[in-house]
Image (cartoon, helix red, strand yellow):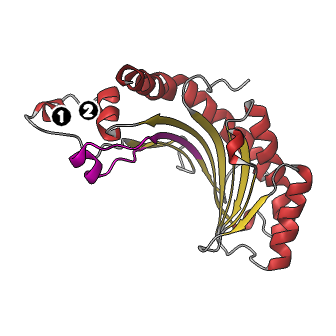
Amino acid sequence: MNPYSSLCDDFGVYIYLNTKMALPSGRETVLHFFDRLRKTYPQMMDFDCRESGEFVLEEDREQGSYRWVTLEARRLCAGYVNPPDLEAADALHEHLLDVAPYHLDFNPLDCEALDVLFAFDFMYSGNHDEVVAEALGLNTTLEGLLQLPGSRVLNYEPSLMLALDDPCRLQCRMSIETRTNFYQVRTGQFPEAPISVYFTVRQYWGRQPFKDFTESYRNQRRICQELVDSHIIPAVVRPLAQTIAAKQ
């Protein structure tokens, strides 16, 4: 069971494998790679080559729960949006990390960093930055700014990055992305759009203790869930969900 489905509108588990050299972009290699993925996950039928040069294979997004894989110039990305459980997301990511090095001809020597990310989306029609500031508050020395007559919050996207080991090779980052612009605040016309809370655990490669990508992924995913459960859910996700619910 997905333990986070009741806390937000959409939840996803993503990975980003960043390489030092360019990944293959030839027609035969790319199609062969995605065709092998499609054989493992037959519902991944939607393939696209975007103007930016990215190649994408994904399931039908209208189902609400779907997998996707993207091949960029120097990054391999994948995600499972609204997975039935975390194990289903793990299965996708571990399979991809096992087979991609062989089909795309790269190895750990070429890896810059591996990211494991949890994403929480909250649909909200209103001033995103204002609701984030209300839910999470400001530093007590700055709270008075919110009380200025006629003031309105135009941008508030808290971000925090921490090192989790002495060499700073293992890091985590919490960030919030809002989607309100100045025009919407000025006119009072706010379309419904997601407020996103991201929590990432990044492992820089090179002198890391893991033998392969899958082993590192399992460690990062474990750390990510532990920190999300103990800190991000009570301090960020629940206050934001409660504040949004009170305004609707």
Whether pointer 1 and pointer 2 mark residues with C-beta atoms closer than 8 Å, the reply is yes
Residue shown at 59% from the left, 73% from the top: 52
Mark 2 — residue?
A: 138
Q: Which type of secondary structure does the marked residue at label 2 adopt?
A: loop
Image side of residue 112 versus residue 90, left or right: left
The spot of residue 15 in percent (x, y) is: 66, 50
Quadrant occupied by the C terminus: top left
Quadrant location of residue 127? top left
Quadrant occupied by the N terminus: top right
96 in relation to 12, above or below: below
The question of residue 99 being in magenta is answered with no
Q: Which amino acid does label 1 sit on?
A: Leu
Mark 1 — residue?
A: 142
Chain part drawn in magenta? 177-201
The spot of residue 193 in percent (x, y) is: 45, 43
The alpha-carbon separation of the residues under discs 1 and 2 comes to: 6 Å
Image side of residue 5 versus residue 153, left or right: right
